Amino acid sequence: MIEVAVKATTANLGPGFDCLGLALDIENRVKFSESHRNFPDKNNMIYSAVKRIFDITGKPMPLIDIHQQIGIPVCRGLGSSAACIAVGCIAGNIMSGANMSIDELIKIGTEMEGHPDNIVPAFLGGFTVSFMAEEKVVYFRQKAYEGFKYAVMYPEYTLPTAQAREVLPKEIAFKDGVFNIGRASLLTAAMITGDVELLKYACRDKLHQPYRKSLVPEFDNIVDKAQSLGALASFLSGAGPTIIAILSKDEKDFEVTMKNHLKIMKGNWTLKIVEASNEGVRVL
Ligand code: HSE
């Protein structure tokens, strides 16, 4: 039997569309065991990732059972699909004896997911910058800055990434591109150094949040409230609907006041305060 653990991830962090990512200390654990029956759900992403590795090696895949202990909210913009893919790739690599490198698995995972911004931190933990270039996933990975914690706020409704990508424009104004390049560059520096003055400006975005707000009607209200309660920055996590506020680690009052505020919002919102994680996907 193999057991694999993987963390949640947030992507974009505001301006870093499809390239910035951060692992968060929310975990899924998945057990794989031999089975005597066919796995019932061939569309299961963990199963698909295991199968992908076996297909690449050309070896027949054995019958397996998959048991999940789920901590990562599904379809909320917290990297649940990247987590399934990372777990499946790691387990498939071991079960098949393929002995692929992490970089090879990251590439396979990115091809399955379509973009690397959740996949890379799911595999490696920490804060990451990544993109696809000439069939290769190019990435930078840094230990997460220790002075921040993260208020992760999500509603009971889900938002499939495909739907959240449909509302994006096909083209953007040149000035909006310039706006985001500056913020994303500054945000990378702020996430490494912990410079809170930079963070105040760095999470703003003109590429996706303005368009996706229509799918998360509570967005402006929650972000305004978070900022008024001392959040250093707030953004839509991945494709949403989760909203994340970055807090100083010694901040004390945010949780209680924000939970009370969320009670008056539609959508039955949950708030969890978590730390970033430097742990990538791992075999237990
Ligand atoms: N960068 C992706 C997006 C993350 O915003 O659509 C969600 O998969």
Image: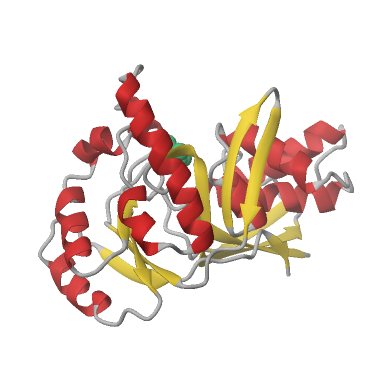
Looking at this view, is 202 or 222 the one in front? 202
Residue 259 placement: quadrant: bottom left
Which quadrant: the C terminus? bottom right
For the point 43% across and 53% down, the residue is: 74
**Residue located 48% across and 65% down the image:** 71
Picture residue at 78% right of the left edge, 65% below the top: 1
Asked if residue 276 lies left or right of residue 259, the reply is: right
Single out the residue that lies furthest toward the left.
Answer: 264
Q: Position of residue 210 (x, y in %)?
A: 24, 36
Q: Nearer the viewer, residue 176 or 76?
A: 176
Establish if 88 lies above or below 161.
Answer: below
Q: Where is residue 135 shown, x and y percent of the image?
A: 70, 25
Q: Position of residue 132 (x, y in %)?
A: 62, 30
Q: Residue at x 39, y 42 (%)?
A: 183
The total number of labels drawn is 0
* Residue at far top of view: 171
